[in-house]
Image: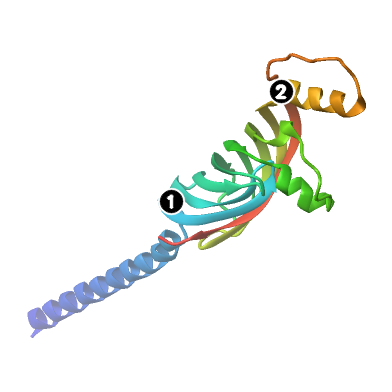
Amino acid sequence: MGQVRSVALVVAAVAAVATTAHADSTQLVATAAPMASGSTSGKLGVIAGLGLPDGGTLGLAWRPVRPLRLDASFAHNYVSPGYRGGITYIVLGSWATPTLGIGYGHFYDRDANSAVRTITGDATFDSAMLDRVGYDYADARVGLELGRKHFTFFLHAGITRLTAQIHDVAQASNMAAQQSGSMVTVTSTDPNVRLWAPTVDLGFVVYLL
């Protein structure tokens, strides 16, 4: 009877240890699950924004790792279509975080006269230099982003280097001279313009996958 009682006590002790180990394992899995579900690494989403000199943008965003987001978007600045791409470093993994980013964009040459006529209300406005307006730009920005898992709102500001070519300068100058009665004729190649300017954009990202 003493041996049977000893065996029973050993079996009961082993069962208690196994039950405790199983409970600890279940608690560990339950604790780890929320941490995994809160990660934004490897997520694909839709990004939309509005800014200068970006215009309106709509495209895709991808986070291959938690601190890094890549984006590529179609763009329009009210005059011409274009595109933009960027890389954003997300400093913190918290709900609110500062960011650092760089980007590049391009807008194709289009006639800007109609846009100027609409804005100014002058139906007679026409300039040869606005027949073909387009530009390239590269920017560096710092910002603030709010949200983490499924939705992120962002506000970025910084500096941009804009490059453009002004077309038909000689034609526009000669037309102005003729209207003023001057006999001076201007001959000139189309100059390239490079300038530094402030840049800002705001928008959001919705993560889908």
Q: Residue at point 8% right, 85% down?
A: 1
Residue 34, image quadrant? bottom left
Residue 133 lies, in percent from the top left, at 66, 35
Relative side of 16 to 85, left or right: left
**Three-letter amino acid code of the residue under disc 2:** Val
Residue 58 lies, in percent from the top left, at 54, 53
Looking at the image, residue 33 lies above or below residue 135:
below
Circles 1 and 2 in contact, beta carbons < 8 Å: no
- Residue 10 in sight: yes
On residue 41, the disc is: 1
Q: How many marks?
A: 2
Foreground label between 1 and 2: 2
Residue 154 lies, in percent from the top left, at 64, 53
On residue 116, the disc is: none
Foreground: 198 or 175?
175
Foreground: 54 or 187?
187
Give the quarter of the figure containing the C terminus: bottom left
Residue 45 lies, in percent from the top left, at 47, 56
Foreground: 42 or 117?
117
Q: Secondary structure at mark 2?
A: strand
Looking at the image, residue 183 lies above or below residue 159:
above
Relative side of 174 to 102, left or right: right
**Three-letter amino acid code of the residue under disc 1:** Ser
- Residue 154 in sight: no
Q: Residue at point 20% right, 79% down?
A: 12
Judge the density around disc 1: few (<14), some (14-19), many (≥20) Cα neighbours within 10 Å: some
Residue topped by disc 2 = 193
Q: Residue at point 11% right, 77% down?
A: 7
Foreground: 138 or 188?
188
Q: Secondary structure at mark 1?
A: loop
Residue 53, image quadrant? top right
- Label 1 vs 2, first from the N-terminus: 1
